[in-house]
Image (cartoon, rainbow, N blue to C red):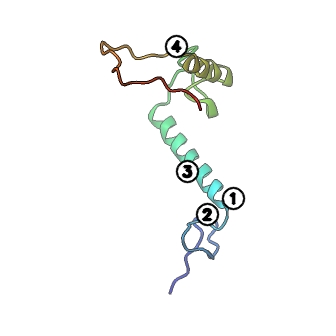
Amino acid sequence: MTTKKCITCNTPLQNTETAFCSPQCADAHLACQMDRIEGEIRQKYPNILCPICGKPGSGEYRPFCSKRCADIDLGRWMKGSYVIHTDESPDDNDEPITEK
């Protein structure tokens, strides 16, 4: 019988229901996968421009150029500035969502 090992550090697993030996290994694996995906996106779309100011997107804020532009965009979403216009009218059964 082969022992199942952590896919991050190759340590034998006590719990065979998981692929990681610790939360730290799971986080490290996720960070590695995110870096790989970010690299693939950069290769495929090297010239993505910030949708707020038009400067080249950079690093962790991509497609935005900075935290400032990312926050401006988030604020626009939260204020409802971004909408999809439609000719449909709301159904009579649609109730507004209220917090409980």
Where is residue 76, by image quadrant?
A: top right
Q: Residue at x 65, y 55 (%)?
A: 28
Is residue 55 visible in the rendered structure shown here?
no
N-terminal of the two: label 4 or label 3? 3
Measured in 3D between alpha carbons, the distance from the residue under mark 1 to the one under mark 3, in whole angstroms, is: 14 Å
N-terminal of the two: label 1 or label 4? 1
Q: Point out residue 84 in the picture as x, y percentages from the top left corner.
A: 40, 17
Dot 4 amino acid type: Ser
Dot 1 amino acid type: Gln
Q: Which residue is mark 3?
A: 33
Measured in 3D between alpha carbons, the distance from the residue under mark 1 to the one under mark 4, in whole angstroms, is: 39 Å
Nearer to us: label 1 or label 2: 1
Q: Which residue is mark 4?
A: 81
Q: Point out residue 57 in the picture as x, y percentages from the top left corner.
A: 57, 25
Say the numbered circle drawn on residue 8. 2
Measured in 3D between alpha carbons, the distance from the residue under mark 2 to the one under mark 4, in whole angstroms, is: 43 Å
Q: Residue at x 59, y 22 (%)?
A: 74
Say the numbered circle drawn on residue 89. none
N-terminal of the two: label 3 or label 2? 2
N-terminal of the two: label 1 or label 2? 2
Where is residue 38, by image quadrant?
A: top right
Q: Is mark 3 in CB contact (under 8 Å) with mark 2? A: no
Dot 3 amino acid type: Gln
Decide which of 79, 35 is in the foreground and name it: 79
Dot 2 amino acid type: Thr
Decide which of 25, 93 is in the foreground and name it: 93
Q: Residue at x 62, y 58 (%)?
A: 26
Helix, strand or loop for disc 4:
loop
Q: Residues within 10 Å of mark 1 (few under 14, many from 20)?
A: few
Q: Is residue 46 left or right of residue 59?
A: left
Q: Which residue is mark 1?
A: 24
Nearer to us: label 2 or label 4: 4
